[in-house]
Amino acid sequence: MLDHVSSLPDSVPVLIVGAGPVGATLALELAHHGVRSTVVERSTTVSAHPKMDFINGRSMELLRRLGVTEEIRRRGVAPDEPFDFHWVADPEQPPVSIWEYPSVAGIRQKFADATDGSAPLEPYQRLQGSLLEDVLRRQVREHPLVDLREGWDLLDLTDDGDGVSARLSDVVHGTEHTLRASYLVGCDGGGSTVRRCAGITTQQSGPSTRHCDVYFRSQDPALFRNGKFFLTISAGGATLVNRDGGRTWTGTFVLPDGEPEPADPLAVVKERLGFDFAADEVLNVAYWYGRLAVADSYRAGRVFLAGDSAHQFYPTGGHGANTGLGDACDLGWKLAATLRGWAGPRLLDSYEAERRPVALFNREMCANLLAVWMRFPQLAAAGASRPQLAAYLGKESFQIDNLGIHFGYRYTGSPVVRHEDASEPDWQWQSIVPTTVPGGRAPNMRLEDGAPLFDRLDAGFTLVDLSGENRGKDLVEQARRRGLPVALLTVDSPAVHAVWERDLVLVRPDHHVAWRGDVAPAPRAWDEVLEQVTGS
């Protein structure tokens, strides 16, 4: 990391505003493709508050490509810790309902023998957002292709069509500097300065609500009165999150607008949980607004939005950070392709076409679970009996068993996917539907030597040849003559062929299928495929 204004270059390929998990992942994605970036971040340290607590399996697959998953697992919650939700109507009685979901170890065991492409390559991982930020920021700080500037803030930006001029402030030294970037990406959160400066509006669904988080340490066994859990949702209006499987917690409650901040927020948590406990230390108190909003556009010229600057969700369902990590990986390889000169103008246009529908869908999925969260205390206050509450919650428990939401999004409206005329395959809420239909994530499979197929995919495009006749060789050579980074992966496996459905499958850097077929196209037809999938 460089500290002085004098060492800041006059121009950079990509300027990223915000070094949270999304901004840091975007920088690592660009570096993965050999592209330099500069990241400016107002804070000089990672967040004191834990924020998110769930990296879904699809995000872990994408992060695996960047070489950071081992460190995330090492610093995360132990693999055998439960992922249960406890719904408590009366603190003197057992939970009225328990939503059970397998631990990380349980997920691995569940899919250990799967050979049909229905298994995730990586299970989810619970890790405090502040720790994820620390892991990724350390990687960014040490990477030779990333210039991280902590203690720097964006004041304003101007896009003149040929580039973006960003007016930056060195918060520590009180000086300003103008930096020129080919592209600028706002990863600066829900109150995004980049979004405001770019003139991009947001579309909000429903009202916003104010919340208070109390982050504390406690070893009091009263907190585990009903056994170990991930979340306790109290009918009294508090949510309790066990952050590490042990002594670190977050208690959250709604604070109505206009109501003053309580003098003792931890006392409010105890009151709404309905029982007392001893706290060793209050680590932090944070106030935040929950909202369901998606930006009306993800792009204004050479300025892009990713993560919370593009969409804001409630924590319910873990959609916020994970949607943002998907944004970073999608935009990262497309920016890299554009800067390296092998992409056409439609490739960057496809970022919004692909990622905004995912955010709109996830917003509604978040609202689904949020409605249960809000309805439970309302039903209890209205006098619903324990059997009624248990039956209602039992019907809704499907919501946390949602592999399909995390793995099953398909870029059906993407202009850079070679779509087919045939009807789209089925989609399942609770499982991964293995298919190589263009636009969807390719199925995860093990090769004959036990290695994951995903680990053999190239950083660029990969043409997976399952024909047994080396039909992809000439296609790859033709692509390379066009200057395109297309690698050939020959797979001799009847099991993989049965799941992958075609002899030839062209896979993008993000594991999504761009094209497939059984017959090698004629040269001109193959040129047309390559032109479409690279946005030419």
Image (cartoon, rainbow, N blue to C red):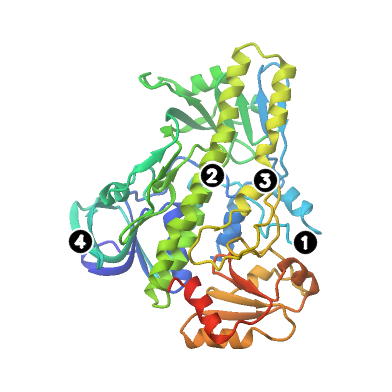
Q: What element carries label 1?
A: loop
Label 1 or label 3, whichever comes before in sequence order: 1
- Image position, residue 285 (x, y; %): 43, 31
User: Relative to residue 286, is residue 181 depicted above or below?
Assistant: below
Q: Callout 2: 10 Å neighbours few (<14), some, many (20+)?
A: many
User: What amino acid does circle 2 point to?
Assistant: Asn
Could you say where residue 106 lies in the image, as x and y percent from the top left? Answer: 75, 48
Q: How far apart are marks 4 and 3 (CA)?
A: 48 Å
Q: Quadrant of residue 82?
A: top right
- Kindly indicate whether the residue at mark 3 contacts the one at mark 4 (C-beta within 8 angstroms): no
Q: Real-space Cα distance between discs 4 and 1? A: 53 Å
Which residue position is annotated with label 4?
178
Give 120 or 7, whichever is nearer the viewer.
120
Q: Distance between the residues labelled 1 and 3?
A: 17 Å
The residue positioned 37% from the left and 53% from the top of the image is: 18
Lower position in the chain sequence, tag 1 or tag 2: 1
Type of amino acid under label 4: Thr
For residue 138, the mark is none
Q: Mark 1 points at which residue?
A: 116
Tag 4: Cα neighbours inside 10 Å, few (<14), some, or many (≥20)?
some
Which dot marks residue 362?
Answer: 2
Q: Which of marks 4 and 2 is in front?
A: 2
- Left or right: 386, with 351 as reference point: right
Q: Which of marks 3 and 2 is nearer the N terminus?
A: 2
CA–CA distance in space, label 3 to label 2? 13 Å
SS at mark 2 in the image: helix
Q: Name the residue under label 3.
A: 429
Mark 4, secondary structure of its residue? strand
Viewport quadrant of the N terminus:
bottom left
Total labels: the figure holds 4
